[in-house]
Amino acid sequence: MRGNSLSRLLVVLLLLIIVGVGAWQLWNNAGLFKQTSINMPISLRPQITPTIYPSQVTVVESVQALSRLETISYAVEKVITAESGQGALGFLFGDRLLLIAYGQVIAGIDLGEIGIDDVVRGADGVVYLRLPASEIFIATLDNERTQVYDRSTGLVGLNEQLETEARRAAEQHILEAALERGILEQAEENSRHILRSLILSMGFEHVAFVDVLPTPTPPPTLTPTPSPTPE
């Protein structure tokens, strides 16, 4: 009889131990799950990165830093004929020369003329920029390469100013030749390409070159939300 009671007691104790171990495991697993969900690694949390664009002043200062932006250079060769004292008495007073002229014409845009009123930053990240007109910076004769190829002079017709006048005319013809070839249009196109690369490198998504700037989009007005009144 006493043996049966002891056996029953052992069975009850064994059942209590099994139930206790199971309950502890359930509690431990629940605590681990809770801890894992709370202490999620930062790398797995969703990150919201705001897009921050430079101000208009920053854009203008970066552009102005380029100052006189020389974007194209033309090398031009011209043959100039200059003469004086021609006519019936040309054999006495005549003077005629053939000048082979070489020159260089450089064009670009003076970015120092761009001000804060020439840049508009759109809310969509687009920069609208109004450029000054392209212009000729240098139109000069290469005096070392330019030379008189041929010259014929009458008995008393040497004109000491003829070559000087021929060189002056050559410089003007070289400038006109560059303009006819579209140096100003090419200078503007090259300037836009350079400035677009510069502004995009500052974090903007698009650049638009316009003659008339759009109306700036006013910044959104933030209305504070009233705090709930505690009851």
Image (cartoon, grey):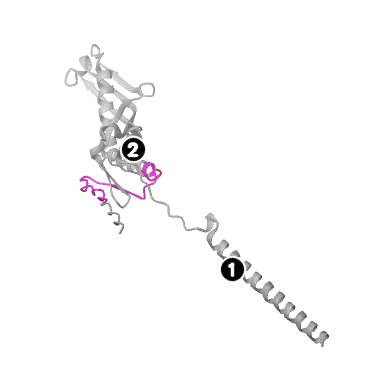
Quadrant position of the N terminus in the picture? bottom right
Residue 142 painted magenta:
no
Q: Amino acid at mark 1?
A: Ala
The foreground one among 184 and 30 is: 30
Q: Amino acid at mark 2?
A: Thr
* Residue 21 position by quadrant: bottom right
Residue 203 painted magenta:
yes
Q: Which residues are magenta?
A: 197-222
Determine whether the residue tagged by mark 2 lies in a helix, strand or loop. Answer: helix
Spot occupied by residue 53 in the image (x, y as percentages of width and height) = 36, 45
* Residue 119 position by quadrant: top left
Is 156 displayed left or right of 48 in the figure? left
Q: Which residue position is annotated with label 2?
A: 58
Quadrant position of the C terminus in the picture? bottom left
Q: Residue furthest bottom?
A: 1
Q: Is residue 81 above or below residue 184?
A: above
Of badges 2 and 1, nearer the viewer stands: 1
Q: Which residue position is annotated with label 1?
A: 30
